[in-house]
């Protein structure tokens, strides 16, 4: 098979995570299987998954879509502090997500018996953790389940990794009344207990991370948010003892006040972005890496050396369990599917594309929960056969009580699993009306989420802009001048898209000059021809106007276009949805313009040109000795945002490419 299952890593209410070997790449990965235990079960004597009953089918499929969509979203993140999603695929009537393998342990393993961490120890990983969380939010996403067990510390340098995102679990729990709402008491703010998810935002994750910091400085899990709200409503004191009191004398007051700010009951009273919160937690000057000498630092070093635990990163499952050291190699058990030609017999949500094969160690049927008797299920539709090795349990293995995997010594026994009985189409196969309803619902939810996330990013970006009358730079590499003339001494370099505040203006040699402030107290003069007025109320269109002007200027050189590309990458994350998508289109068009200025022969290209090609090799191709952006990139953008009016412009760009 494409993946050989090595061990069971964790079993939660939303799915199961395995340690697996990617056979083609010969690397270990974490393999997450969608299996919500309140909706689905294994079929007897096989690895195939099915809904428990007909009434669970719609929720099972809806959750499967959320599971896959969240994987697709997370796969876009290439950040050292966010779990890396490599791939996903459909098999066994469900979906699997392939994640990067890491060595380390979660933060909860170091927080036993009320132990605390020093401020220096927390600073070892806090800045990087905030970077990861900010990247999640800038991508229009929320974690929704930040807690010590979902913060993973790498063995090699104790750098943090955000794992086990809870958004898909949360969506499914809200969609299905049969699914228990998943929150972690003490770490979940009050808005997560409510059915209206629109109240959640960046501030929700900030509360949860603030609760983790509170646990680190106090040794106690914060009082549950529902208790705090109940006390406030009864006009009684907040039962949560403030961090400034819990950590007085042991931590800086600035740091403690930052924790209390994040733990405000009212979401509007919390920091509205990681960028606003960071200065209250971390000094502006970079902190030296402290020597670990006590507390959590000692446990980090000692546990790493003594246990030598190798843990695969797991996410999207609740109540992660970290496994013991593994010491067995298991035989490959290829699974081959034999299906009838009747479309009604296809597995639920089966993919039209070939699925990777998954090789499992043998299963003990007694340990697999049996499905409820299906309705109208007299037809045998799928047969599973494989070469298996009879096994004896390994003393070193760990298995879930519900879904144990038997570890083995090989023998020559051949095991053939009898044909499994799938439910009939009237019970489990969604009809066209149901599928259309699910698709419409999914698109509506997606559009709402995209608009809300973009709105939040836009508001956060505007809050960072300088005060006063604003202008936006339209030239690349423009130097501020100490006086309003080109011969004056040079100051800071400004790039395309830099926002400056206008302090005064004058005229010299028939040209208007502006004295500006860059926002970090760098002041100087700049000519009018390098700036445009910036519309604070319509930032997106201001960015689009600058980009189109520069893109249409045929005198723009390669350096200008690279600078424009970098500006557009940033700007597309700081505006509302429609202009953001238009900027994404302009990013691709700018990349195309930059490729047109690179010589066809690499021997004639500069190192800068070659570096640019290397950094975009996944997006470009060579056609008739010329480089161009793959049409697939434009088509993907169109498919993702086809519900927006700007999709017409994307389609026009695709036609021009053809």
Image (tube, rainbow, N blue to C red):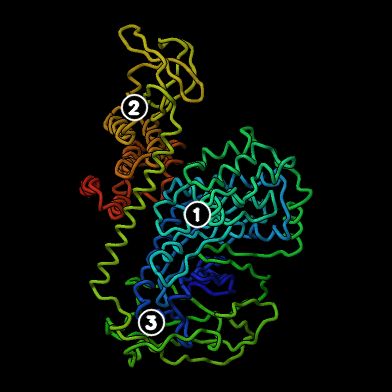
Q: Would you say the residues marked 2 and 1 are in contact, meaning their CB atoms lie under 8 Å apart? A: no
Residue at x 34%, y 90% (from the top left corner): 377
Label 2 residue SS: loop
Give the labeled residue for mark 2. 534
Q: Name the spot of residue 288 as percent of width and height, x first.
A: 70, 38
Q: Nearer the viewer, residue 106 or 389?
A: 106
Q: Name the spot of residue 398 as percent of width and height, x first.
A: 64, 76
Q: Report crowding for label 3: few under 14, some 14 to 19, many 20 or more residues within 10 A (C-alpha).
A: some
Give the labeled residue for mark 3. 53
Which residue occupies the extreme top position in the image?
A: 509
Q: Nearer the viewer, residue 617 or 49?
A: 49
Give the labeled residue for mark 1. 190
Q: CA distance from mark 2 to mark 3?
A: 58 Å
Could you tell me if residue 64 is visible in this image?
Answer: no
Label 3 residue SS: loop
Q: Is residue 40 above or below residue 442?
A: below
Q: Is residue 473 above or below residue 588?
A: above
Q: Which of the two discs, 3 and 1, labels the residue nearer the N terminus?
A: 3
Q: Which of the two discs, 2 and 1, labels the residue nearer the N terminus?
A: 1
- The answer to which quarter of the image holds residue 362 is bottom right
Residue at x 50%, y 72% (from the top left corner): 3
Q: CA distance from mark 3 to mark 1?
A: 33 Å
Q: Would you say the residues marked 2 and 3 are in contact, meaning their CB atoms lie under 8 Å apart? A: no
Q: Report crowding for label 2: few under 14, some 14 to 19, many 20 or more residues within 10 A (C-alpha).
A: many
Q: Is residue 279 above or below residue 14?
A: above
Relative to 637, is 365 on the left or the right? Answer: right
Residue at x 52%, y 61% (from the top left corner): 183
Q: Is residue 204 above or below residue 67?
A: above
Q: Name the spot of residue 181 as percent of width and height, x first.
A: 47, 65
């Amino acid at each position: 098979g494409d993946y050989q299952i090595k061990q069971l890593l964790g079993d939660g209410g939303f799915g199961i995570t395995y340690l697996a070997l990617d056979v083609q790449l010969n690397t270990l990965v974490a393999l997450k299987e969608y299996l919500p235990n309140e909706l689905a079960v294994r079929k007897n004597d096989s690895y195939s998954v099915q809904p428990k009953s007909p009434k669970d089918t719609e929720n099972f499929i809806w959750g499967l879509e959320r599971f896959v969509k969240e994987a697709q979203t997370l796969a876009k993140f290439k950040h050292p502090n966010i779990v890396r999603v490599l791939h996903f695929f459909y098999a066994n009537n469900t979906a699997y997500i392939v994640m990067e393998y890491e060595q380390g342990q979660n933060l909860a393993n170091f927080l036993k018996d009320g132990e605390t961490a020093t401020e220096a120890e927390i600073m070892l990983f806090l800045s990087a953790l905030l970077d990861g969380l900010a990247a999640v939010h800038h991508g229009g996403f929320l974690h929704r389940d930040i807690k010590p067990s979902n913060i993973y510390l790498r063995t090699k340098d104790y750098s943090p990794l955000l794992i086990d995102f809870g958004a898909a679990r949360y969506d499914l729990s809200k969609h299905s009344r049969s699914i228990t709402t998943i929150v972690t008491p003490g770490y979940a703010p009050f808005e997560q207990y409510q059915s209206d998810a629109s109240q959640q935002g960046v501030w929700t994750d900030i509360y949860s991370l603030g609760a983790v910091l509170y646990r680190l400085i106090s040794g106690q899990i914060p009082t549950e948010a529902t208790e705090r709200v109940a006390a406030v409503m009864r006009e009684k004191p907040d039962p949560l003892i403030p961090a400034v009191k819990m950590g007085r004398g042991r931590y800086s007051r600035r740091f403690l006040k930052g924790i209390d700010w994040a733990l405000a009951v009212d979401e509007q009273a919390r920091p509205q972005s990681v960028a606003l919160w960071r200065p209250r937690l971390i000094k502006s000057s970079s902190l030296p890496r402290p020597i670990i000498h006590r507390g959590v630092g000692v446990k980090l070093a000692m546990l790493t050396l003594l246990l030598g635990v190798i843990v695969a990163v797991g996410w999207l499952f609740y109540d992660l369990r970290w496994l013991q050291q593994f010491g067995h190699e298991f035989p490959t058990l290829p699974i081959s599917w034999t299906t009838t030609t009747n479309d009604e017999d296809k597995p639920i949500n089966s993919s039209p594309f070939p699925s990777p094969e998954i090789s499992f160690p043998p299963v003990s049927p007694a340990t697999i929960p049996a499905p409820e008797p299906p309705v109208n299920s007299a037809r045998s539709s799928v047969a599973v056969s494989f070469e298996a090795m009879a096994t004896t349990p390994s003393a070193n293995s760990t298995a879930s009580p519900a879904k144990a995997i038997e570890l083995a010594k090989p023998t020559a026994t051949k095991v053939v699993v009898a044909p499994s009985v799938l439910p009939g189409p009237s019970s489990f196969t969604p009809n066209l009306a149901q599928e259309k309803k699910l698709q419409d619902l999914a698109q509506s939810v997606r559009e709402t989420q995209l608009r809300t996330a973009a709105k939040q990013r836009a508001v956060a970006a505007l809050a960072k802009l300088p005060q006063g009358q604003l202008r936006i730079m339209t030239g690349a590499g423009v130097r501020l001048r100490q006086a309003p003339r080109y011969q004056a001494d040079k100051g800071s370099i400004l790039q395309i898209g830099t926002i400056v505040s206008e302090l005064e203006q004058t005229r010299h040699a028939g040209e208007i000059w502006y004295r500006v402030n860059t926002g970090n107290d760098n002041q100087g003069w700049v000519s009018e021809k390098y700036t445009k007025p910036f519309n604070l109320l319509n930032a997106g269109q201001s960015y689009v106007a600058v980009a189109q002007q520069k893109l249409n200027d045929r005198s723009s050189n390669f350096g200008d276009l690279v600078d424009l590309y970098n500006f557009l990458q940033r700007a597309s994350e700081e505006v509302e949805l429609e202009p953001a998508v238009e900027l994404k289109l302009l990013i691709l068009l700018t990349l195309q313009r930059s490729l047109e200025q690179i010589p066809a022969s690499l021997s004639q290209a500069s190192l800068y040109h070659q570096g640019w090609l290397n950094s975009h090799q996944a997006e470009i191709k060579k056609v008739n000795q010329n480089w161009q952006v793959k049409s697939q990139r434009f088509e993907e953008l169109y498919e993702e945002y086809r519900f927006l009016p700007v999709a017409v412009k994307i389609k026009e760009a695709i036609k021009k490419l053809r």
